[in-house]
Amino acid sequence: MRLIKLLLPLSVATILSACGTTAQKQPYDYSKFQRTNPRSILIVQPTSSSVEVKAPNAVLAQSTRPLAESGYYVFPVVLVNETFKENGLNDGAEIQAVDLKKIRQVYNPDAILYMDIDDYGTKYQVINSTTTVSVSAKLVDAKTGDIIWTGAKKITVNSNDNGNQGFLSAVTSALISQIKDKVKDTAFDLAGNVEANLLSAGRTDGILYGPYHPAYQKPVTQLPPVQNQ
């Protein structure tokens, strides 16, 4: 009985220690990314689960900047998209199914970025509106087809996030938000923020800096601090 009393705290401590070890997040494995070492990236039109028909073009249009600023040559997305359309491929699902050999024959990129839009748009309630953009992405080696990096980002903005207000003020604020959204697509701006967070280097589990960036192949400890969006 005395032995059990002595062993019981030790067992609990061992279990808690094991749980702590299991919960600790492992560092992202960049070995495939580093082996491919891409210099150029081709972005193809995203697939979309959203009912918003403008979502693919809105996300595609803002995908170049974070990758280019991270040090990669990015093929002009408008030119690439038009080339696919001229060959009878009009939506993201068709374009993303194109064989890698065909893409290499035309563009010869080092890597291809595939994106899927999980959510895009604004939902209106009585005194509130919620805008959400959610995008997942994977970077694929154009020669081997290996996935060398994956990531996902979701941001939701609530129109009542700016503080407490009365019912009448809340209704007025919601009405103004709906009118503003009719004039300007709030989700478009939010998509740019999502992609800046998802596709920029120097972030936790993000892509690595490319060869045209001063931080290329430098140790993580020497990287400059990341500015919040």
Image (spheres, rainbow, N blue to C red):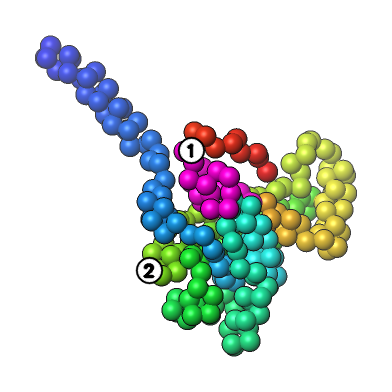
Task: Say which quarter of the image contains residue 27.
Answer: top left
**Residue at screen point 58% across, 49% down:** 213
Let me know if residue 220 appears in the view: yes
Q: Is residue 5 magenta?
A: no
Tell me the kind of residue under disc 2.
Thr
Name the residue nearer the viewer: 60 or 144: 144
For marks 2 and 1 on the same chain, the one whose residue lies earlier in the sequence:
2
Prevailing secondary structure class for the magenta stretch in the rendered image: loop
Instruction: Answer few, some or many: residues within 10 Å of disc 1's Cα (few below 14, many 20 plus, some between 14 and 19).
Output: few
Q: Secondary structure at mark 1?
A: helix
Classify the position of the C terminus by image quarter.
top right
Let me know if residue 131 appears in the view: no
Instruction: Answer few, some or many: residues within 10 Å of disc 2's Cα (few below 14, many 20 plus, some between 14 and 19).
Output: few
What residue range appears in magenta? 196-220
Task: Say which quarter of the image contains residue 19.
Answer: top left
Number of numbered discs overlaid on the protein picture: 2
Which residue in the protein does label 2 denote? 144
Farthest residue, direction top: 2
The label number, if any, that marks residue 220 in the structure image: 1
- Give the x, y percent position of residue 109: 51, 69
Name the residue nearer the viewer: 50 or 65: 65
Tell me the kind of residue under disc 1.
Val
Classify the position of the N terminus by image quarter.
top left
Q: Secondary structure at mark 2?
A: loop
- Give the x, y percent position of residue 65: 66, 57
Task: Say which quarter of the image contains residue 122.
Answer: bottom right
The label number, if any, that marks residue 42 in the structure image: none
Is the residue 18 above or below the residue 161 in the image?
above
